[in-house]
Amino acid sequence: MERIIPRWEWRTFGASFGEADRRFAALERGHVQESDEIYLLSRDTDANVKIRDRLMDIKTLEQVNAEGLEQWRPVMKAAEVARVCAALGVAPIAGLDAYTLERLQAELTQASRGVRVAQVHKRRQRYTVAGCTAEMTDVVADGRPIRSVAMELEDPARVVAAVREMGLDRFENISYPRGLKRLLGLSA
């Protein structure tokens, strides 16, 4: 069985990133990845719960360090209903052992559960910065466009160095769920 190693992540959202846009433009580009995803956004948690390629994908926040980096652990790439409900902070769904993703989504998004579905299209341009995986991403969530830039690696010191090298340290670190909730007006 493959050992899952949590990764330290730094991400922000915005229309432009000043000097960082110019610095990324000067880097060698990696591959481009496009995807359509369904995010399940909870009013009660900032869990990273999404459906991509018809698979449920959950990452849990392990810790936040002194520099504000977030360490996320992928916990599943399948769909265990109890684990999905727990991540979203909602009561378990009684009698839903066998389901389709559509039925699960319908159950989770009942008004009483406080879960909102967001249709998200991403176009990621990959880079390597200071040994970190980096990306500039064009995001469209429920028809609303925004950009995101991110750095990640198992070593938090290298992530902080990459963020500083690209001139991004003046921006707030915002996870995907929080960024999407802000974009869609779902923030508290």
Image: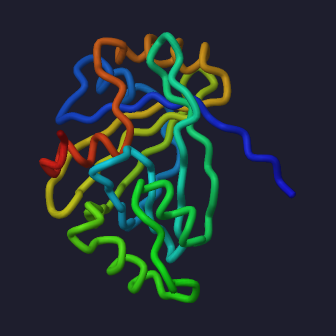
Tell me what residue is drawn at x 83 percent, y 53 percent.
Answer: 2
The image quadrant where one finds the N terminus is bottom right
Q: How many marks?
A: 0
Tell me what residue is drawn at x 42 percent, y 79 percent.
Answer: 104
Q: Is residue 44 above or below residue 83?
A: above
Give 186 or 24, whichever is nearer the viewer: 186
The answer to which quarter of the image holds residue 159 is top right
Q: Is residue 28 above or below residue 32?
A: above
Q: Is residue 118 visible?
A: no
Q: Is residue 144 left or right of residue 19?
A: left
Tell me what residue is drawn at x 51 percent, y 18 percent.
Answer: 162
Give 183 or 146, whichever is nearer the viewer: 183
Give 160 or 29, whichever is nearer the viewer: 160
The answer to which quarter of the image holds residue 38 is bottom left
Q: Position of residue 40 (x, y in %)?
A: 35, 62
Colour style of the rendered protein structure? rainbow
Q: Is residue 73 visible?
A: yes
Q: Position of residue 80 (x, y in %)?
A: 60, 71
Q: Is residue 172 left or right of residue 74?
A: left
Question: Hey, which residue is sitting farthest right in the picture?
Answer: 1
The image quadrant where one finds the C terminus is top left
Q: Is residue 176 left or right of residue 101?
A: left
Q: Position of residue 59 (x, y in %)?
A: 54, 49
Q: Position of residue 54 (x, y in %)?
A: 50, 77
Tell me what residue is drawn at x 74 percent, y 46 percent.
Answer: 4
